[in-house]
Image (cartoon, rainbow, N blue to C red):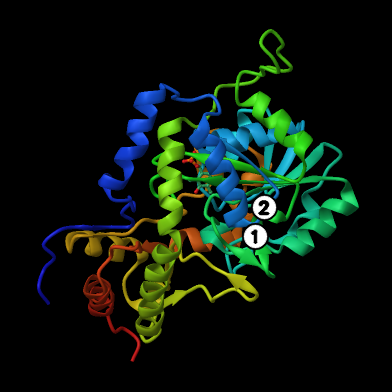
Amino acid sequence: MDDLKKPIYVTKPSLPDLQDFLPYLEQIWETKILTNNGPFHKQLEKELAEFLGVPYISLFANGTLALVTALQVLGISGEVITTPYSFVATSHSLLWNNIKPVFVDVEPEFCNLDPEKIEAAITSKTTAIVPVHVYGNPCSVDRIEEIAKKYGLKVIYDAAHAFGVDYKGQSVCNYGDISILSFHATKVFNTMEGGVVICRDAETKKQIDFLKNFGFAGETKIMACGINSKMNEMQAALGLLQLKKHSSNIKKRRVIDQLYRQNLNEIKGVSFLAKPENTEVNYAYFPIFIDEKEYGISRDMLYEKLKEKGIYGRRYFYPLISEFSMYKGYDSANPDHLMNAKEASQKVICLPIYPDLELSEVEFIIGCIADFRINTIE
Ligand SMILES: *Cc1c(COP(=O)(O)O)cnc(C)c1O
């Protein structure tokens, strides 16, 4: 096998043609409207709400501030049930609001919060559930809603991976009280940095829009201790262009996903997640799980050997959030109660997937994974 000419990273951000972006920049330079709910900001909110099929959207500077603000607008406090198998921003957003995260294990099928383990973790202090649609695969939204109703809890979905994902014929972001998306450079849809809060009613959107602008509810009126987390006009303009490319990007991702599925299926010791039912997925990630006994070498060994070949996968999500120093001390961080999360975290590598990834490169990656396997069993 020939070596790669250039390294392949887990993702490569998609951008529009620079030529297409210039007129937007010219308009910004001409009008001098740079931020504070300018024309591109307004237009992107409108177009995104239509594109995703959701009622109310507020644009943010990034996904983390969107989540911090979503928790604030709903007045969440005390304890919140969440998953350890996610990017650290999920729990950090709780700590930034003085909320105690309570970690509950994931189910093994999609590595999403296990709804059957939520009830046992509810206490008199629990006010909400913050599940994550990990890799863009929908959580058990109906079951979670049932539990939330029964105990009077709010549900805030960290949908950072789930841009454009539909479940049972509508946006997965229409479930729960609020969902947040991230438009970070590494995500399926990017505005370099960016994010949104999606909510159900106009009043909540109004409050969110106050909170992201210092709490200003008029020239001289401050309604709460808000923050500055507004998306600027350059980001919003980029978003308008990115939206035009989104469907074709998803098609390219789908072809890569198919190629991985068809070929990795035949390599013993390598498994991957099933396609979820009733779901229009976005092919945001391609996680594989390495069974060391069957594959012959460990996940970490494969990870290193791939790097030597110039293939930079990522171990999303290793370590678990509950293993980081600021969370380790909590009772709920005890790994004995997080066995499925722990196992996934020790087996996972996310393989490169992005619209510009060549199919020959995908074949090279598959070839390496097949070659590195050591036959120890048969
Ligand atoms: C990317 C990500 C975030 C944070 O989004 P930013 O836009 O980078 O702040 C939050 N949660 C999850 C699960 C993510 O993957």
Task: Name the one closer to the observer, 144 or 194.
Answer: 194
Q: Position of residue 133 (x, y in %)?
A: 60, 57
Judging from the image, what secondary structure is the residue with disc 2 in? loop
Task: Name the one closer to the observer, 57 or 176.
Answer: 57
Residue 52's image quarter? bottom right
Task: Name the one closer to the observer, 28 or 158.
Answer: 28
Q: Position of residue 1 (x, y in %)?
A: 12, 77
10 Å crowding of disc 1: few (<14), some (14-19), many (20+): some
Q: Residue at x 37, y 69 (%)?
A: 252
Residue 9's image quarter? bottom left
Task: Name the one closer to the observer, 155 or 99.
Answer: 155
Q: Mark 1–mark 2 contact, CB under 8 Å?
A: yes
Q: Is residue 316 visible?
A: no
**Residue type, mark 1 in image:** Ser
* Farthest-out residue, bottom: 378
Q: Which residue is mark 2?
A: 54
Q: Residue at x 9, y 73 (%)?
A: 2
Q: Residue at x 46, y 49 (%)?
A: 319
Q: Residue at x 47, y 54 (%)?
A: 317
User: Quadrant location of the C terminus?
Assistant: bottom left
Q: Which residue is mark 1?
A: 171
Q: Is residue 196 visible?
A: yes
Residue 95's image quarter? top right
The alpha-carbon separation of the residues under discs 1 and 2 comes to 7 Å
Judging from the image, what secondary structure is the residue with disc 1 in? strand
Per the rendering, the mark at residue 160 is: none
Sequence-earlier tag: 1 or 2: 2
**Residue type, mark 2 in image:** Val
